Amino acid sequence: MSQTIDHVALLPAYLAAATALAVLLTDLFSRHPVPRIAVAGIGFAATAAAAVWLGTLPPRQTFCTDTGCSLVTGGPGAAIAATTALLGLAVLALSARPLLAGDAPPGEYAFLLACSVTGGVMLAYGRDLITLIVALETLTLPLYVLVAMRGGSRRGAVAAVNFLLVSVTAGAITLLGAALLYAVTGTLHLTGIAAALRGDTIPLTAVAVAVIITGVGFKLAAVPLHGWAPGSYDGAPLPIAAYLSTASKLGGVAVLLWLVTEAFPPVLHIAGPVLTVLAVATMSVGNLLALRQRRTVRLLAASSIAQAGYLLVPLAGLTALAGPPGTAATAATAVLVFALFYVMMEVAAFTGVIALRWPRADGGELGDLAGSLRAAPGPAVVLLLALAALAGLPPALAGLFAKITVVSSVAMAMPWLAVVVAVNAVVGLAYYLRFGVLLVRGRGTEPAPAGWPVTAVLALSVAALVIVGFAPQLLWRLASFG
Amino acid sequence: MTAVLIAVLALPAAGGVLAALGHRHRSAGWLATGFAAAGLLAAVFLPASRGDGPLWHRFDVAWAPAIGLRFDIGVDGISYPLIVLTALLTLLCCLHTMSETTRRPTALIGLLLAVEVGILGVFLAANIVAFFVFFEIVLLPMYAIIAFWGGPGRRAAAAKFALYTVLGSLLLLVGVYVVVSSTGTGDLVALAESGGGGMSPATQLVAFALLGVGFAVKSPLWPLHSWLPAAHTEAPTVGSVILAGVLLKMGTYGLIRVGLGVAPEGAHAAAPVLLVLAVAAIVVGGLICLAQRELKRLIAYSSVGHMGFVLLGIATLSGTGITAALYGNIAHGLITGLLFFLVGSIKQATGHGMLTELGGLRTTAPGLAGILGFAALASLGLPGLAGFWGEAFAVYATLAGDSTARAVAAAVAAAGAALAAAYLLRMIRRVNYGPPTAAVDGAAAALRVTPIRLALWGPLVAATVLLGVVPGLLLDGFTAAPFLEWVSR
């Protein structure tokens, strides 16, 4: 059977893959790091632009059979793909100085990053289990190496091995879930799975659903596959830690959203409770873990575990699904909106830390940042704003709206879950406040100037936070599953 | 005249931004104070060319429809006095900051104005989600004021304040979305007019419970008050004034505007609980005050008792009771604001807040002693001063319920008022009379009522007398508001 391929629908993925290839070629012909970084940067920008453009077109689909299509474009997909590419660009900018300083081989670094971004872009459009799992692995595999690329750090090697082991386990769990799901339904397309799951369910369905969700939870650093995050983030180069906590998580969010909105609508009564347990466990464990952290990046990592818990809450609310078909779409929109808010805060936070720590490659102890506000007001204010946003409090309105998004999605259906979120947010505030006060008190040592690319990311991330703080509706428009 | 409405919020916001940008310069502090003064002027002129609707003025634009959020602000006879009180106290605090020796005054003023914007927004909000957003704005600036300008135990006190408050406000958030999800609107006026937007009694009870606990933490209503004494004791003078004067009112105002407004049937179901909590707060607050040995702590705990009277008025759910509660709100803001200015000055001048270290103020600093005596008499509810009307009518409204339980509650509350007299007179006896202690004697110069201090305290004294003699100034505004009719039917 031959079929026509809609190459337009594949454009962002082509561009992301071409970026990787172009970096590889540049690496052959040029000895200087700048061209490689520049090529990757241009490639990421082009990928993002293509994703945005594709998002303005009516939805397209390709690689279709009678059970469904493997590749579908649309609004939320465009938001995920464009954000992933932009995050790649941001991480590249944050890595520019270390790469120029020879901390890591620039060609390999940019190539691996581009490969990972390609995986992330594919996740935004994939709609069958194989495409999604291959894309997930494409997103993850390059990160093993990138995590270890902190010049002369043993912590990096440990972090990479740790990450590898958990990731392989998670990959196996996800595959097992996919295999079980295939065994139950006999199809790989998500829409086909939904059709096959309608009617009576057998116990194996529940196992398949629970296993695949747990496996994907690894990318979000959701409990029980969360343990790798603090160590791996802390051992990785700071920009890669930022990537792990944003783009990599966004990939997990994408898979979860496609599963819930396309494949699982008939079995939300099974998926909902699984997600509820994951959400409650993840936010509680993450917050308690964060309370005892003494190292900056470990704190941010633990806090990002907690945030992953909040992120799952709207999906957990689907347990109480009363029947209206729009509910899954509403919950999915809420999750994606929260995820977009979250990546902005996280990029701002990590960029702040990078600027305050330069030229050191790690996040150090919390105490190392004491008194940053006087020593380096610019990055410190950004970091403070990001912390306020993560705590969900004004003046960071973006964070407040993120919190509102989560609570509003379940307040009516499951008030108790909203109250659990509330209690967790109180615990969260305790460590964000501790960190924030530390930055304000006293006078620390002034960091070296981190270079214009870091400053640019700093400025753009704050601008993004401020804009969505005053015009939050923008994100709903971007992320609508309608 | 929506321009005035917007100016009330925009002027302090602009002042706050200026102060933040120029936080190293004293002149920026004065400039920001000017903006606070202009904001007060705008607030005073709010009644000008008022419309006929339930709100005098209204400004309503969509903000984030997906979460039911509209930038919808308005003002009526119920919120107007609180808005003026907020603008007045903030201005006085700015002037206090600039006139006394304060560390980094401009930064402090920036934070005070940020707090003011949040509080004003709460009083102005006509959309329940916007109400919540403004409610949250207050938290971090107030935290910073306590944590960076406070006394020796400030860090723990500030953290306690923040954690308690955020728990309350998150429960509030859940309540807000129970309302928004089940009615499909966040319009506080429409919700109040329709008596809950068609929510079932059970849903209303859930909503009221969540909202009520949220507001109870802020007010703070016994037994959720334990953050308050620590925060007050450690906060700088201006922090205490704002905290007691207007920040607590966000809780009681919210309970009336949002709690009674959107979930009247829930409020009816919960009224007996509120009544018991109110009486308990009055008695417990009074008893704790009798045992206090620290001046600021004593005034702080007295707020628990006074807020008990406000809750008592609310719990009657009658027009008289709610009017009394609203009156008590304003009176407490003026009187306790004044008291915190006074004890703050005493503590700063003498370096002591313990009652045992103070005494003989009457001989050393007769002016200050006189004003302190006046404020204490006003606080204990002396007829003829502002504190009397709210508490007397709260008790009267409780009695008017024609049930034995309410008669008992009224009797206990009245006895609680006697406790207030006991602890305040005890405070006056300790601080004003007897031989001057070493601490007071050594600070005679710093305890003088300077012209600047007179200018700061004078408006509060004058307003206390004025509202005591002419209560109609406020009452007419309250009773003319359609909102009062909606919630008390």
Image: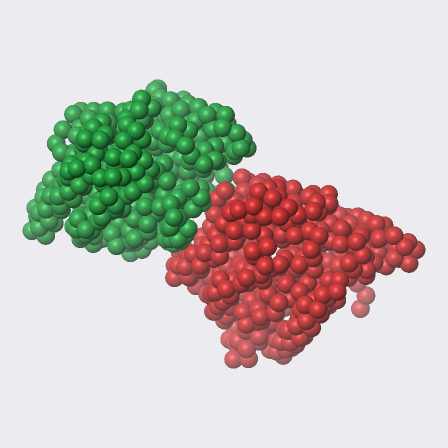
Chain colours: A red, B green
Q: Which residue occupies 73% across, 43% down?
A: A452
Q: Quadrant of the N terminus of chain A?
A: bottom right
Quadrant of residue B273 within the rendered picture: bottom left
Could you tell me which residue is drawn at 59 percent across and 59 percent down? A365
In this rendering, the answer to whether B369 lies above or below A223 is above
Depth order, front residue of A325/A314? A314
Q: In percent of the image, x 52 and y 80: which residue is there? A: A203
A112 displayed left or right of A354: right
Give how far across and how far down residue A399 sits, in percent. Answer: 52, 49
Q: Is residue A391 above or below residue B314?
A: below
Q: In this view, does B154 lie above or below B48?
A: below
Question: Depth check: B135 or A94 in front?
Answer: A94
Q: Is residue A473 visible?
A: no
Residue A84 in the image: state x and y as whole percent.
Answer: 68, 54
> Residue at the location (20% across, 48% down)?
B289
Find residue B368 and report its image quarter: top left
Percent position of residue A213, x then y = 57, 70
